Amino acid sequence: MKPEEEDIKALSSAILRDAQAETEQIRTEAKTKADAVRQRAREQAESESEAILERARAEAQRLRGQVIATAQLKARTMQLEYRENILDKVFDAARQRLSSIQKRSDYDQKVAQLLREALIQLKADKAEVRADDATLKPLKARALEQISKELNAQISLGKPLESGLGVVVDASEGRLHYDNTLETRLSRLQGALRSSVYHVLMGEKL
């Protein structure tokens, strides 16, 4: 083989080796880069999966809390409705029994108290009193005269009440008015008594 051919062959071999080496290096670098890309993709996917799971857990917790709060509110509302229903029945029953107060032996004293309270509230020295038939009896018998002297007031009787038990007092030519019937007194006390009555009904100590 001629020297020129040998040189060409050697050069070709050298070029081929360099090309193979470069190809191997490129393949290695590409593999390394591909591995790195796959690793980053896995890490990103894991991070996103964890973020999604965390959001799902937070949403589940929020919904669970919402359901519990709604259930508690509903239970509380039902409890209050039950309580109010019981109390309404108790006070309705009390209203039905108000007439029995007029049969008590001390009702004449009660009438005097009703009239006295009304006049004191109105701060009147002249007034007209209206009452139901059962209340008129002790008024005419003693209470009217007794309270008139006690408060130094001029008190007259008006028309009998068409509804209600007790007294209704008007003063200053009707500009001042005080309803002190048993029904109205119960209504005035009802708000303050509801809690105490409920505790008693539930067997609790006050």
Image: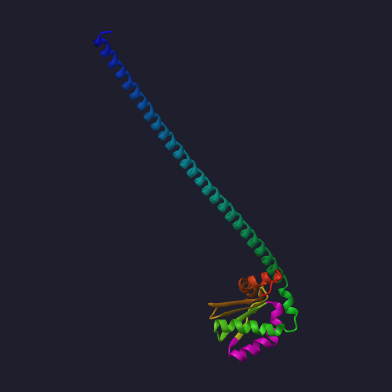
Q: Nearer the viewer, residue 18 or 30?
A: 18
Lateral position of residue 15 relative to residue 173, left or right: left
Res. 150 image quadrant: bottom right
Lateral position of residue 13 relative to residue 191, left or right: left
Q: Residue at x 63, y 62 (%)?
A: 80
For the record, the magenta segment spans: 132-154
Residue 67 picture location, percent across and down: 58, 52
- For the N terminus, the quadrant is top left
Q: Nearer the viewer, residue 73 or 185?
A: 73
In the rendered picture of this protein, how many numbered marks are placed on residues? 0
Q: Nearer the viewer, residue 83 or 14?
A: 14
Res. 82 image quadrant: bottom right
Residue 134 picture location, percent across and down: 72, 79
Residue 73 picture location, percent across and down: 59, 57
Lateral position of residue 18 relative to residue 84, left or right: left
Residue 27 picture location, percent across and down: 38, 26
- For the C terminus, the quadrant is bottom right
User: From what the image shows, is residue 151 above or below residue 50?
Assistant: below
Q: Is residue 175 magenta?
A: no
Q: How is the image coloured?
A: rainbow
Q: Is residue 141 magenta?
A: yes
Res. 165 image quadrant: bottom right
State whether residue 42 appears in this view: yes
Q: Residue at x 61, y 73 (%)?
A: 192
User: From what the image shows, is residue 184 above or below residue 17?
Assistant: below
Residue at the far top in the pictured view? 1
Residue at the far left in the pictured view? 4
User: From what the image shows, is residue 56 above or below residue 20?
Assistant: below
Q: Nearer the viewer, residue 132 or 201?
A: 201
